[in-house]
Image (cartoon, grey):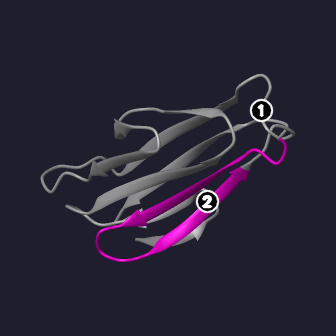
């Protein structure tokens, strides 16, 4: 896995991508298909046969009412063929606690 920019990553056929949410305080993290799993860890293996050129993963963070001070969610993405990157940190003050992560198959 190589980082193209904050929300775009280059991945290889057959590579397993792991997304981890490190949660401080009280928050719920929702992650769209094709990722599988549940908070705080999701995985997706890029097909080796006829993969799409691009996969988009939507992430949404909901901070629970009464979140403790300094609550945050740090998203980290990594690939089985190398590369680990902090994508973004969300706090209750984040204007839009959501993002789309794009995986480009090389």
Residue plotted at (76% across, 44% down): 71
* Secondary structure type for disc 2: strand
Which quadrant does the C terminus fall into? bottom left
The residue where tag 2 is placed is: 87
The overriding secondary structure of the stretch rendered in magenta is: strand
- What whole-number distance in Å separates the C-alpha atoms at marks 2 and 1? 22 Å
Residue plotted at (43% across, 75% down): 83
Q: Determine which of the numbered discs, if any, sits on residue 67 in the image.
A: 1
Q: Position of residue 62 (x, y in %)?
A: 67, 28
Give the vertical position of 59 relative to 45 (above or below): above
Question: Which residue range is magenta in the image?
Answer: 69-89
Q: Determine which of the numbered discs, if any, sits on residue 84 in the image.
A: none
| Residue 34 seen anywhere in this rendered image of the structure | no
Q: Residue furthest left?
A: 49
Give the vertical position of 68 relative to 72 (above or below): above
Residue 82 lies within the magenta run: yes
The answer to which image quadrant residue 6 occupies is bottom right
Q: Position of residue 7 (x, y in %)?
A: 60, 56
Viewer-nearest of discs 2 and 1: 1
| Residue 23 seen anywhere in this rendered image of the structure | yes
Q: Position of residue 32 (x, y in %)?
A: 45, 32
Q: Position of residue 70 (x, y in %)?
A: 82, 48
Which quadrant does the N terminus fall into? bottom left
Query: Closest to the observer: 72 or 13?
Result: 72
Give the vertical position of 40 relative to 48 (above or below): above
Query: Closest to the observer: 12 or 78?
Result: 78
Residue plotted at (46% across, 44% down): 40
* Secondary structure type for disc 1: loop
Q: Is residue 38 left or right of residue 8?
A: left
The answer to which image quadrant residue 81 occupies is bottom left
């Amino acid at each position: 896995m190589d980082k193209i920019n904050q929300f775009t990553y280059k991945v290889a056929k057959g590579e397993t991508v792991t997304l981890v949410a490190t949660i401080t305080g009280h928050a719920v993290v929702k992650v769209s298909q094709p990722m599988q799993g549940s908070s705080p860890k999701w995985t997706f293996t890029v097909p080796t046969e006829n993969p799409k050129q691009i996969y988009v993963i939507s992430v949404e963070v909901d901070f629970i009412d009464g979140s403790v001070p300094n609550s945050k969610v740090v998203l980290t993405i990594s690939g089985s063929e190398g590369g680990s990157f902090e994508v973004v940190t969300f706090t209750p003050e984040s204007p839009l606690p959501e993002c789309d992560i794009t995986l480009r198959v090389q």
